[in-house]
Image (tube, grey):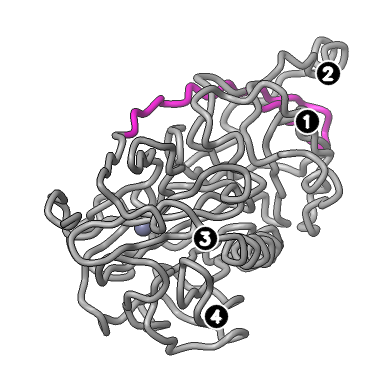
Amino acid sequence: MAQASCSRLVLVDALSYDALMRVTALLACTLTLTACERGGPSGSPADSSAAPPSSAPPVTWTAPSVAAPAPTPSASAAPSAAPAAASAEPPDAGAADAAPLADPSRLTLDRSAVQGGLLRAKLDGKLRKMNFPGHRAVVSDEGDFLIAFGRNAPKQEKITITFEDGQVLERVFDVEQRTFETDKIDNLPKDMVELDMPTRVKLTQAEQKLDAIRKKYTKKTCFKEAFIWPSKGKVTSRYGQPRLLNGTDGGIHWGVDIAVPVGTPVRAPACGTVVFAEKNLPLSGDTLIIDHGQGLTSTFIHLNGFAAKVGDEVKQGQTVARVGMTGRTNGAHLDWRMNFFEVRIDPELLVSGDK
Ligand SMILES: [Zn+2]
């Protein structure tokens, strides 16, 4: 009985796009098996390797200070999600030398940088240009923008901001490096670790659809709210944990798993618009996505039906769905993932101290 060895109530997981490229994974624990949809395609090839990617071309945004849809061509052409191991790009050397330095207080941040973390940033003054290799930044009319650090973000990353008045501000982020405990699960039936081809194809199609949704930019400002837990319960699996299934690479678990019974309400962690709600996706089962604005989304999987539909504007705390155990899962739980565009971030860091 392959069921005896799990100490956790719920184990999950997952896969996705990379599933095609590698042996995939799912795991199982006590009763059943859970699969959480895994890593975002665009973001994750890099995210799932141990070393920071060095091949990702730096992305330089000449962002207008008005909120405009993020430039998508380069986003899709380049794996912009991966915080590029900033390949010492000459940051406007000439200009910076000549330009007057801005007072550092013209860039404010709500917290310090950490792998998997999201920072809310604000500029004092109109932006002319921003150089932030590997990042996608879209500055709103009010000067707000978000900064995400991926799971494998390097120790230091640098942003160079040129204001409309010509002043230049440089900031080096010291990114807190985390360790992610490996989830090791053995004695799984083979069909739980490997997917058949039809499932892989369906999975890839579903992932592409979800990725396209997550890459959209909207002006909504719900990202400003202090996030709350969508359901409260024991956290049984966390963001960023590598999975080792029957000794083979099972990918990275991107969500926070909260063990709660089937039927438990799933509440919007912040306001937003429901941009996706579909049943029976491969592995992730009933899946719902809320857009919180400016590239920030929440994804909930393994649900048991919805209490909101696509296009609905929801308030923080509003019930949007019910917890379930749809898709491949080994028990009832809520799996909550968050993205900044294609970069996977850690929901727990946004609600820390809230519970
Ligand atoms: Zn999960």
Q: Residue 172: percent from the left, percent from the top?
A: 57, 21
Image position of 337 (left or right of 244): right
Q: 103 above or below 223?
A: above
Q: Nearer the viewer, mark 4 or mark 2?
A: 4
Going by the numbered disc 1, the residue's amino acid type is Thr
Q: Earlier in the sequence, mark 3 or mark 2?
A: 2
Residue nearest the observer in this picture, 263 or 285: 285
The reply to whether dot 3 and dot 4 touch (C-beta < 8 Å) is no
Going by the numbered disc 3, the residue's amino acid type is Phe
Q: Earlier in the sequence, mark 4 or mark 2?
A: 2
Q: CA distance from mark 3 to mark 2?
A: 31 Å
Going by the numbered disc 2, the residue's amino acid type is Asp
Q: Which residue is mark 1?
A: 162
Q: Which residue is mark 3?
A: 223
Q: Nearer the viewer, mark 1 or mark 3?
A: 3
Residue located at (84% from left, 39% from top): 62
Packing grade of label 4 (10 A; few <14, some 14-19, many >=20) is many
Q: Nearer the viewer, mark 3 or mark 4?
A: 4
Secondary element type, mark 3: helix
